[in-house]
């Protein structure tokens, strides 16, 4: 640590911040599911991993452009998650859902091992960097940070301004009363669940530009998104983005302190945080 | 009176079946064939998972605490046992005792967490603890030799037949423990706090205390299985004990048999035998296929047979399994 | 004093559920707590039984302060309660449910079982011994809840709207049971009730709660005549004399 000069320190921190932005994006969709819709989805990380893989193959092997690919990916994620929500999750208790989603996660993860092998794949984008006062900033990462912020802002706007968004918020706040107001609560829940999956697919596309992907990556992202959600307070979408940034930052710092034990410290902090403050840091903000 | 007779008949029937099974298992190692080592390996592996599932059942079945990091207790038991033997040159018994002690401390912490956090939070904490131990055992190369793992000194090479009997005895004892707990004060207390914590508290149940007690019992049980594992396999790697696959297998065994029942895991162990067979058959090819099958089985069982195989056999175990009430759909 | 509540105050945000409540109950009596919906009756009960921590004030029972103790400790001190929405353990049968309460005083299974059996005989539940609670009718469920609370050997029993939803015959049979509990076991009862028949025929002392404060206390006859109570229930300009 002593050999680190200030510019490289800043480089690592800023890079951590930018990846934190993407963490924030998928975590906020996880937070949306978990807090607002009360679905405990343990297959989340695996779906993210799958989206990363598909993007990788789209880029490397299949010759379709990003836009048709995006449409197909979002569409299929939307439909699959809608059906899963409608026929499986909505009818069952949290416990059972946890186990079912674990099963699904296992299926996806192992299918990826079977089809794509457990060898890590990376897009290998040559990263252009800009240098400001000795601090290197990777352009791809910067773009991803802004893109995730914009996507999230869009989602917030959608929730606050459109009719569908408003019905979602109504159902989240009180399912029974929303039903009395003539909203088909179950359909709205299914819809919201699918929307979170579309956000998930989008973050998969973005994530693969930054990191390599392997079948077991899902577990890590699952853990991360849960951690971030806890810090933010469940269901707090905006908070999840900011705590995503915080976690990106924290990971960077832990890596500087000791890259060997960074993960160990991370999990330790996670466990301690869950014990000390399971309600989250930004809970006060989410009221009202 | 007729009802009593029926009950007795049922009891007699099921206990006859159990005794017959035990006799077969006891005599099995005496048969001399070339297949024997293979069969014994299968059975010992399934015994290990039966014991682990029984220990998981105490938390998940009785307390309603869905532990997703049960491999942590198991792996810690194995690691501490072998580490104490390698680095401090102590006897096996002492090593096992120390591993039990460490596991009790870990269990105390997790039990204390379970008072504060519930459901998915608890699942995530336990998952995180397991991940923590996995990373630690991978990264702390000086002590754990990282992914290469630790090897038991050859001093403790026990004959496979002894190990088989030890494992069998453990299964019998573990099933008995769970049955006893169900019928004792502890069982009543745990079920009451699982079913309705507020009502339990109002009736004077010290829910925090019982949760910690249950976690410690469960952890000690898993720890002993870990110690047995290191005696049997003779080496331990982070990948073989601390991964989610182990927890998954434990949960599958418990689920397929019947969650929260004492006899369920014995039925559920079928899946371990099938798994070992499939793995042996596929060899190294098609990595991931067994995992897919696991996932499918787990999901399908929860959806279509939430009470497990035991519900078909209808062995009248004073069952605590849930009838999986569905969410009310408006 | 046997049981005493002093200056209990609890606010939720801007809403004051309990505002400086003081009351005293003597040993062996039956006391009632009435008041319009939302007056803070159940909040008070939950504070007494330890599920809600009050902002200010104290609860004293047999000379001991109970404030800030956890519910199970309070139960050990001798205060048992039943809940407004009848709670139960879906997976346990009647016998075991009552046993849960009995374990409060007894460590060993045999003692707890015999205690549970005693209570079941007392409340005439012995025929339903092995039933799951979800299969019982409402009256029996209430009796089971009552039995479990009784099994903890309380000195003071808090009953939160035990009679809600009962038919008149059921009310009379439950009433007899309550009187039996009070007279034969010497247990002090403190009941929240909407069914006025219960209050009028059993209670020696009635407290009336409105907007989180005790507006009146006294014998049932005094309460009936109180101007404050009538106006709290029926509005300011209601003239009781016109309707008699």
Image (tube, coloured by chain):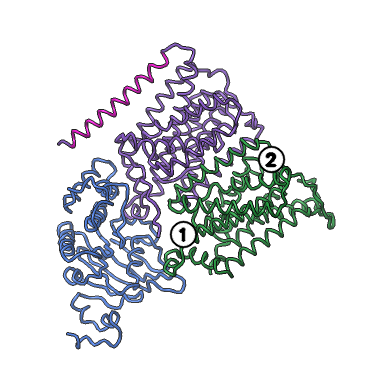
Q: To which chain does the residue with label 2 belong?
A: A
- In the rendered image of the structure, the colour used to display chain C is blue
Q: Which chain is green?
A: A
Query: Residue B153 appears at what percent x and percent y?
Result: 58, 21
Residue C166 falls in image quadrant: bottom left
Q: To which chain does the residue with label 1 belong?
A: A
Query: Residue B209 appears at what percent x and percent y?
Result: 40, 46
- Callout 1 environment at 10 Å: few (<14), some (14 to 19), or many (20+)? some
| Residue occupying the point 30% across, 67% down | C4
Q: Please state which of the two labelled residues, at mark 1 or mark 2, is closer to the viewer.
A: 1
Picture disc at residue A113: none
Picture disc at residue A260: 2
Q: Nearer the viewer, residue C71 or B306?
A: B306
Q: Is residue A193 left or right of residue B135?
A: left
Q: Which range is magenta?
A: B3-30
| Residue occupying the point 53% across, 19% down | B156
Instruction: Using the rendered image of the protein, determine whether residue A180 is visible from the camera's viewpoint.
Output: yes
Query: Residue B50 appears at what percent x and percent y?
Result: 43, 31
Q: Nearer the viewer, residue A108 or B234?
A: A108
Q: Is residue A228 left or right of residue C53?
A: right
Q: Is residue B16 magenta?
A: yes
Q: Nearer the viewer, residue B265 or B217?
A: B265
Picture disc at residue A186: 1
Whether residue A161 is situated above or below residue B106 in the rendered picture: below
Q: Which chain is purple?
A: B
Instruction: Using the rendered image of the protein, determine whether residue B102 is visible from the camera's viewpoint.
Output: no
């Amino acid at each position: 640590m002593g050999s680190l000069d200030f510019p490289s320190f800043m480089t690592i921190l800023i890079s951590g911040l930018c990846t934190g932005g993407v963490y924030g994006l998928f975590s906020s969709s996880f937070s949306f599911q978990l807090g607002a819709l009360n679905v405990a989805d343990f297959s989340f990380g695996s779906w993210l991993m799958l989206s990363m893989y598909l993007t990788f193959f789209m880029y490397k092997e299949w010759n379709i452009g990003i836009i048709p690919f995006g449409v197909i990916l979002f569409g299929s994620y939307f439909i699959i998650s809608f059906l899963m929500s409608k026929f499986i999750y909505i009818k069952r208790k949290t416990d059972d859902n946890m186990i079912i989603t674990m099963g699904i996660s296992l299926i996806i993860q192992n299918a990826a091992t079977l089809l794509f092998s457990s060898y890590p794949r990376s897009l290998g984008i040559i990263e252009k960097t800009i240098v400001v006062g000795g601090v290197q900033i990777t352009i791809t990462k910067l773009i991803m940070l802004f893109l995730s912020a914009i996507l999230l802002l869009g989602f917030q706007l959608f929730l606050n301004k459109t009719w569908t968004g408003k019905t979602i918020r109504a159902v989240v706040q009180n399912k029974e009363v929303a039903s009395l107001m003539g909203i088909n609560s179950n359909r709205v829940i299914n819809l919201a669940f699918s929307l979170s999956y579309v956000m998930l697919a989008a973050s998969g596309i973005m994530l693969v530009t930054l990191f390599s992907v392997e079948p077991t990556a899902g577990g890590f992202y699952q853990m991360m998104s849960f951690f971030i959600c806890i810090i933010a307070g469940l269901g707090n979408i905006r908070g999840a983005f900011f705590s995503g940034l915080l976690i990106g930052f924290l990971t960077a710092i832990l890596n500087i302190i000791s890259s060997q034990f960074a993960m160990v410290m991370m999990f330790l902090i996670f466990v301690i945080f869950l014990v000390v403050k399971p309600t989250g840091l930004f809970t006060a903000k989410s009221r009202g | 009176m007729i009802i009593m007779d029926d009950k007795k008949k049922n009891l007699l029937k099921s206990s006859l079946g159990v005794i017959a099974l035990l006799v077969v298992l006891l005599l099995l190692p005496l048969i001399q064939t070339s297949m024997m080592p293979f069969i014994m390996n299968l059975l010992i592996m399934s015994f290990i998972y039966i014991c682990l599932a029984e220990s998981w059942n105490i938390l998940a079945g009785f307390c309603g605490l869905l532990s997703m990091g049960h491999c942590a207790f198991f792996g810690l038991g194995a690691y501490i046992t072998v580490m104490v033997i390698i680095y401090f040159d102590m006897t096996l018994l002492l090593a096992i005792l120390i591993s039990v002690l460490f596991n009790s401390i870990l269990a105390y912490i997790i039990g204390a967490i379970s008072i504060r956090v519930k459901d998915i939070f608890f699942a995530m904490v336990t998952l995180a603890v397991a991940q923590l131990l996995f990373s630690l055992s991978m990264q702390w190369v000086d002590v754990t030799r990282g992914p290469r793992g630790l090897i038991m000194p050859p001093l403790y090479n026990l004959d496979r037949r002894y190990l088989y009997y030890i494992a069998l005895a453990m299964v019998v004892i573990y099933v008995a423990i769970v049955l006893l707990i169900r019928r004792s004060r502890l069982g009543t207390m745990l079920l009451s706090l699982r079913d309705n914590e507020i009502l339990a508290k109002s009736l004077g149940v010290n829910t925090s205390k019982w949760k910690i007690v249950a976690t410690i019992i469960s952890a000690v049980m898993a720890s002993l299985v870990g110690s047995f594992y290191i005696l049997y396999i003779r080496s331990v790697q982070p990948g073989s004990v601390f991964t989610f696959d182990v927890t998954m297998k434990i949960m599958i065994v418990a689920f397929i048999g019947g969650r929260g029942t004492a006899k369920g895991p014995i039925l559920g162990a079928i899946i371990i035998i099938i798994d070992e067979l499939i793995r042996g058959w596929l060899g190294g090819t098609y990595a991931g296929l067994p995992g897919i099958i696991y996932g499918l089985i787990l999901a399908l069982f929860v959806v279509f047979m939430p009470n497990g195989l035991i519900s078909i056999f209808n062995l009248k175990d004073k069952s605590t399994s849930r009838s999986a009430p569905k969410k009310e759909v408006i | 004093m046997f049981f005493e509540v002093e200056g209990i105050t609890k606010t939720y945000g801007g809403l004051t559920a309990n505002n400086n409540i003081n009351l005293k109950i003597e040993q062996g009596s039956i006391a009632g707590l009435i008041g319009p919906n939302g007056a803070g009756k159940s909040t008070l009960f939950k504070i007494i039984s330890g599920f809600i921590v009050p902002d200010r004030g104290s609860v004293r029972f047999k000379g001991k302060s109970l404030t800030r103790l956890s519910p199970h400790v309070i139960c050990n001190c001798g205060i048992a309660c039943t809940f407004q929405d009848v709670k139960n353990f879906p997976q346990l049968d009647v016998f075991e449910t009552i046993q849960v309460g009995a374990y409060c005083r007894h460590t060993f299974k045999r003692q707890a079982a015999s205690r549970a059996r005693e209570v079941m005989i007392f409340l005439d539940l012995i025929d339903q011994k092995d039933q799951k609670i979800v299969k019982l009718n409402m009256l029996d469920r209430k009796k089971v809840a009552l039995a479990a609370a009784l099994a903890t050997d309380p000195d003071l029993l808090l009953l939160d709207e035990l009679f809600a939803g009962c038919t008149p015959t059921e009310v009379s049979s439950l009433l007899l049971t309550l009187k039996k509990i009070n007279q034969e076991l010497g247990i002090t009862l403190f009941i929240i009730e909407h069914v006025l028949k219960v209050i009028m025929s059993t209670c020696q002392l009635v407290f009336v709660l409105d907007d989180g404060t005790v507006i009146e206390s006294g014998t049932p006859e005094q309460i009936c005549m109180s101007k404050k109570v009538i106006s709290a229930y029926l509005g300011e300009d209601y003239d009781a004399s016109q309707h008699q």
